[in-house]
Image (tube, rainbow, N blue to C red):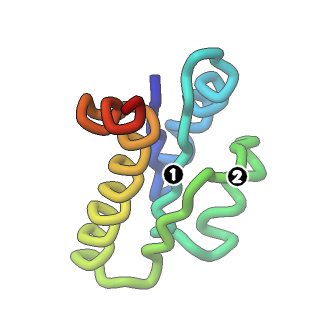
């Protein structure tokens, strides 16, 4: 099972810290911790990683500093790329499986 834990703003960090902590320790669950990068300065982001003992994110989408509508578009596009990659790695289609075995 793959779970994407996505955080972007201060309330998300606070809510997700205990969830990410537990998920990262579970056998059989691949947890990908994604930071949108909306809060990109140390006082708005890094402080939460330190104080809440969050692990470094597996992926940072780095959308900070963009207009809100551009941030939203970039988050959707970049998450789509991650989801597609994970499905390719974890969920091969019948046609790709048969091509590999032939």
Q: Secondary structure at mark 1?
A: strand
Residue 31 in the image: state x and y as whole percent.
55, 33
Q: Quadrant of the C terminus?
A: top left
Residue under label 1, please give it.
34
Residue 7 in the image: state x and y as whole percent.
47, 50
Q: Is 24 positioned to the left or the right of 93 in the image?
A: right
Nearer-the-camera pick, 67 or 78: 78
The residue carrying pointer 1 sits among few (fewer than 14), some (14 to 19) or many (20 or more) residues within 10 Å by Cα, namely: some
Nearer-the-camera pick, 44 or 98: 98
Q: Is 46 positioned to the left or the right of 83 in the image?
A: right
- Find residue 56 and name its label: 2
Which residue, as the protein is rendered here, is positioned at the far front?
A: 102
Residue 49 in the image: state x and y as whole percent.
70, 52
Which residue, as the protein is rendered here, is positioned at the far top?
A: 27
Q: Quadrant of residue 17?
A: top right
Residue 97 against residue 37 in the figure, above or below: above
Q: For the image shown, how many numbered marks are present on the structure? A: 2
Nearer-the-camera pick, 45 or 98: 98
Q: Residue at x 31, y 30 (%)?
A: 98
Residue 84 in the image: state x and y as whole percent.
33, 49
The residue carrying pointer 2 sits among few (fewer than 14), some (14 to 19) or many (20 or more) residues within 10 Å by Cα, namely: few
Residue 70 against residue 16 in the figure, above or below: below
Residue 63 against residue 93 in the figure, above or below: below
Spatial separation of the CA atoms under disc 2 and disc 1: 9 Å
Q: Secondary structure at mark 2?
A: loop
Q: Tag 1 or tag 2, which sits nearer the N-term?
A: 1
Q: Residue at x 38, y 43 (%)?
A: 88
């Amino acid at each position: 099972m793959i779970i994407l834990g996505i955080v972007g703003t201060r309330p998300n960090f606070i809510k997700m810290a205990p969830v990410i902590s537990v998920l990262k320790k579970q056998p059989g669950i691949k947890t990908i911790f994604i930071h949108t990068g909306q809060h990109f300065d140390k006082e708005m982001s890094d402080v939460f990683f330190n104080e809440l003992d969050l692990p470094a994110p597996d992926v940072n989408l780095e959308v900070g500093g963009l207009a809100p509508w551009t941030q939203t578009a970039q988050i959707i596009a970049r998450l789509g790329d991650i989801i597609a990659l994970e499905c390719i790695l974890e969920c091969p289609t019948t046609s790709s499986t048969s091509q590999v075995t032939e």
